[in-house]
Image: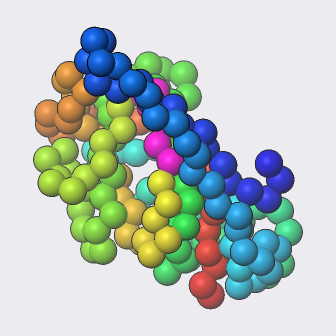
Amino acid sequence: MADKAVAGINTQILLDKIKTSMNGNYSLTPAALGSSSGDGWIYAEKDVTTSSADLLGTTEDFLGSVTGAGNIVAGDKIPWIAIKHTGTTDGSTATSEGIMLSLVVGGTAAYNLADGIFLGKNELIVLKIPNVTVADLHAITVTSSGGKPTSAGSGSVRVRVAAVITNVS
């Protein structure tokens, strides 16, 4: 999978009597890897907290030889991102809290966000959001029940993030 982002997806759906499945993939071949104005990889382990904040910070560095790219910046775009809820607060302490993501420019993530994206304990989500910038992707912890967010979170959640970032600087 060198220099490619690929996620395989398989889902079992509907009631047991009429169960069926769908499968496919979600892939992206980054453009101009290794250039200061192309796409680059980032990997980060982040703590999502009870306050809405950008999921990725401008202290994240591009991986590999992205010549002259340095840290990502608020205006960099996110054509492909994988976010894994580790099920922990710090890499080892278990938590049952989830996270809510917001893709709204200048928005605030909240448990009751109408267009929020919920990620529960140990879940993984892969998104292609090519027009969303680093500054537009926000996250917050939430309490959940029955696979749905029910209230504001009370602690931190550790997530792993791997992404292709388009360096716009």
Label count reads 0
Quadrant placement of the C terminus: bottom right
Q: Residue furthest front?
A: 18
The reply to whether residue 74 is visible in this rendering is no
Where does the magenta region start and end? 121-126
Q: Front-most of 34 and 31?
A: 31
Q: Front-most of 89 and 143?
A: 143
Residue 160, percent across and down? 56, 42
Give the side of residue 11 with respect to residue 39, left or right.
left
Above-or-below relation of 62 to 24: below
In which quadrant of the rendered view does residue 76 lie? bottom right
Residue at figure coordinates x 82%, y 74% from the top left: 34
Give the side of residue 64 with respect to residue 150, left or right.
right
Q: How is the image coloured?
A: rainbow
Residue at figure coordinates x 29%, y 24% from the top left: 14
Above-or-below relation of 118 to 16: below
Residue at figure coordinates x 30%, y 18% from the top left: 18
The reply to whether the magenta stretch includes residue 122 is yes
Give the side of residue 165 with respect to residue 29, left or right.
left
In which quadrant of the rendered view does residue 164 lie? bottom right
The reply to whether the magenta stretch includes residue 15 is no
Residue at figure coordinates x 25%, y 27% from the top left: 147
The reply to whether residue 107 is visible in this rendering is yes
Residue 124, percent across and down? 48, 37
Residue 122, percent across and down? 46, 27
